[in-house]
Image (cartoon, helix red, strand yellow):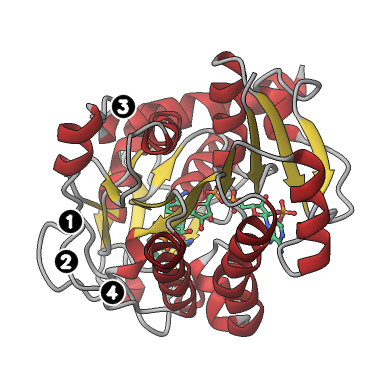
Amino acid sequence: MKRALITGIRGQDGAYLSRLLLEKGYEVYGADRRSGDSSFWRLAELGIERDVKVRYMDLLELTNVMREVEKIGPDEVYNLAAQSFVQASFEQPIITADIDAVGVLRLLEALRTLKADTRFYQASTSEMFGKVQSIPQSEKTPFYPRSPYGVAKLYGHWITVNYRESYGMFTCSGILFNHESPLRGLEFVTRKITRGLAQIKLGLLDKIVLGNMDSKRDWGYAPEYVEAMWMMLQQKSPDDYVIATGETHTVREFVEFSMKHAGFDLAWEGEGAGEKGIDRKTGRTLVEISAEFFRPAEVDILVGNPEKAAETFGWRPKTRFEELARIMVEADIKRIERSRS
Ligand code: NAP
Ligand code: F7E
């Protein structure tokens, strides 16, 4: 039985990856930083709360990381832990760097010292492309991060490459574009929209307030993206891969498709900060814009080229943009209905 250690076990990807590895017969250890929250709601939603062996491990504490690595002796480590919210990284750049950059190094140092034959996955990100230098972005596109989060993740990426090249360790950096699901955190724009719409539909909220509606993202479906993580670690040799759908859409389009699935007939009125989303049937304002949600520096467009992953290990995206919006809207409506019954 293979043993995997997943950091960031409470997060969206930690839950889907745990389910995948359990299905494949792995013994799954989940590293939790002990935030004080005793509920593992994502693992519970997937029905695997009792199957993951949770261990306390904070990426800020090297000796803690070393002790856990030594006790568990993992065959594979998936480093998913991060301060992952781009907007928060402008307010908390130092803690973001400590976790998302130096945290990767702590884990790699623990592995180099204690179990250098462990296969290692680093959760890198399309945010490293930032102010994009070409369209679409591939493994060969130069990086130009636009946030403290992107800059910290770039360190994580290069230190992962460096440990492969310096010490011959099996380390892979997965450059994943945005991936969403009903388990996405509420602070991210897709889930903010689908949860907000479900609340509006069921009479629990007046309107959704958003920021930049024009930014474009390559949005995929998270359960498919964790499969790519596992596939990377099963190859003969370690490498870095872009994982994306190859399509890009604006935040505005995500609002439109979600509205449609929630049964609203949306019309846009006004421009810039004065733009509003109005329900044609009732005349009610459902979407407003606020400066609060704009970022000091924005990533205007992301669209990835996942060809290398397709050619090397046959990974291809299946769920497309509109379907993703439908899955998320329906899940949020069902969740609220369930909690009320
Ligand atoms: P997520 O839901 O925000 O989960 C991240 C997890 O990391 C959280 O459970 C958090 O714990 C944990 N964490 C934070 N600081 C930690 C620390 N000091 N020590 C240990 N654990 C810590 O993120 P996700 O969407 O699942 O993404 C997984 C990874 O992929 C992240 O590294 C993210 O940056 C990266 N990524 C995500 C996407 C995407 O679109 N989802 C795309 C590219 C890359 P708490 O629950 O206690 O806060
Ligand atoms: O923003 C715009 C916002 O926070 C997407 C993380 O998983 O993916 C994620 O980072 C876009 C941005 O995700 C609101 O300005 C408008 O242009 O959902 P987001 P992100 O910043 O792309 C990458 C790949 C990661 O690695 C990250 O960990 O939507 N936007 N209005 C808004 N964004 C938010 N959050 N809230 C709004 O109200």
Q: Label 1's element?
A: loop
Q: Residue at x 58, y 52 (%)?
A: 116
Task: Identify the image quadrant of residue 160.
Answer: bottom left
Instruction: For residue 263, say whether it is visible.
Output: no
Which amino acid, mark 3? Glu
Which amino acid, mark 4? Gly
For label 1, the residue is 138
Which of label 4 and label 1 is nearer to you?
1
Q: Nearer the viewer, residue 267 or 142?
A: 142
Q: Residue at x 62, y 55 (%)?
A: 81
Q: Are the residues flagged by discs 1 and 3 in contact, CB closer than 8 Å?
A: no
Dot 3: within a 10 Å radius of its alpha carbon, few (fewer than 14), some, or many (20 or more) residues? some
- Assess mark 2: CB under 8 A from ligand 2? no
Q: Nearer the viewer, residue 183 or 63?
A: 63
Q: Are the residues flagged by discs 1 and 2 in contact, CB closer than 8 Å?
A: yes
For label 4, the residue is 272
Q: Is residue 326 above or below residue 123?
A: above
Q: Residue at x 23, y 76 (%)?
A: 131
